[in-house]
Amino acid sequence: MKTIQFREAVQQAMSEEMRKDDSIYLMGEEVAEYNGAYKASKGMLDEFGPERVIDTPIAELGFSGIAIGSAMNGNRPIVEFMTFNFSLVGIDQIINNAAKLRQMSGGQFNIPIVFRGPTASAGQLGATHSQAFESWYANCPGLKVVVPSNPYDAKGLLKSAIRDDDPVIFMESEQMYGDKGEVPEEEYTIPLGVADIKREGTDVTIVSFGKIIKEAYAAADELEKEGISCEVIDLRTVRPLDHDTILKSVKKTNRLVILEEAWPFGNISTEIAYSVQMNAFDYLDAPIIKINTADTPAPYSPNLLKEWLPNSEDVVKAVKKVLYK
């Protein structure tokens, strides 16, 4: 296997699929001439030309609608948002058209489209550029929501998303594009809706996804020094949610901590907590703890931002609490 960056994994997934299928194309702000705002489309304009790698105006509502109409007519667009914060300008098209047209047309129209780009915080970018939108889009029937945490998963999941006949929201992170990991050079895909147990353990289950899962790994390493065994589950896809993997783990460890970079009200961790208490209540030896950001807009000040975001120390404290230590 070859070690590559997260951005390269994304580029490889798109390019490999575009070589196989002429109906696939990429559009978005700065994806062509500039090679992508985060260089995730580097070299693609040279290979595929301006008809398949398309720079758009700063008009998310407009180019999202164009892409959805194109998908209705047999194409398979990939739409890049420079950040999902900007997708709010086009959210009417995503929710009211992409997500609903298959049902509203009685199955006459499939909408095979991928909306991708970074989500959540990326350092000192201020409150309007630091929001996590996974739970927003996962709330909408008709959308699939994927949030990879490493290059290997990113490539395999993105290829599956591009091949899917339904709209997929594919969420990345500005702080992960430079992350490196081993990725096979041969063809592979990862099915949507299947979580991955990244680390097996016996004392407590930690569920997370996206870039914040790194804090779970750090906490698990620290707790291991104290003889505490953590099972870490990477959801990878938050809709559809792999309830079975979570429940099986909780039935083994009897304790659950959920780590999510999102505001605490009405998020993915809330849904997980409800599912587990509904389906595995008798297995729980402690209340479920969920760890989220502070319930405020993201601060700009670095010291406040550090307090706002969940971290490994928060995870360690939560694990010890459910273990009554």
Image (cartoon, rainbow, N blue to C red):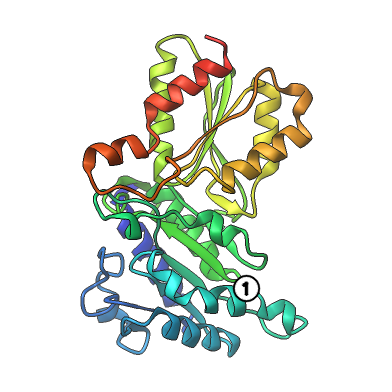
Q: Position of residue 293 (x, y in %)?
A: 43, 41
Residue 90 can be seen, yes or no: yes
Residue 126's place in the image compared with 66, above or below, is: above
x 29%, y 37%: residue: 306
Along the viewing direction, whichever of 46 and 34 lies nearer the viewer: 34
Q: Position of residue 296 (x, y in %)?
A: 41, 46
Q: Number of numbered discs present?
A: 1
Asked if residue 189 lies left or right of residue 177, the reply is right
Could you tell me which secondary element the residue under label 1 belongs to?
loop
Residue 23 can be seen, yes or no: no
x 61%, y 48%: residue: 194
x 40%, y 57%: residue: 119
Judging by the rendered image, the residue that carries numbered circle 1 is 99
Along the viewing direction, whichever of 319 and 234 lies nearer the viewer: 319
Along the viewing direction, whichever of 62 and 52 lies nearer the viewer: 62
Please identify the quarter of the rendering in which residue 38 is found.
bottom left
x 47%, y 46%: residue: 262
Amino acid type at circle 1 is Ala
Q: Position of residue 75 (x, y in %)?
A: 53, 85
Residue 247's place in the image compared with 130, above or below, is: above
Q: Position of residue 252 (x, y in %)?
A: 68, 22
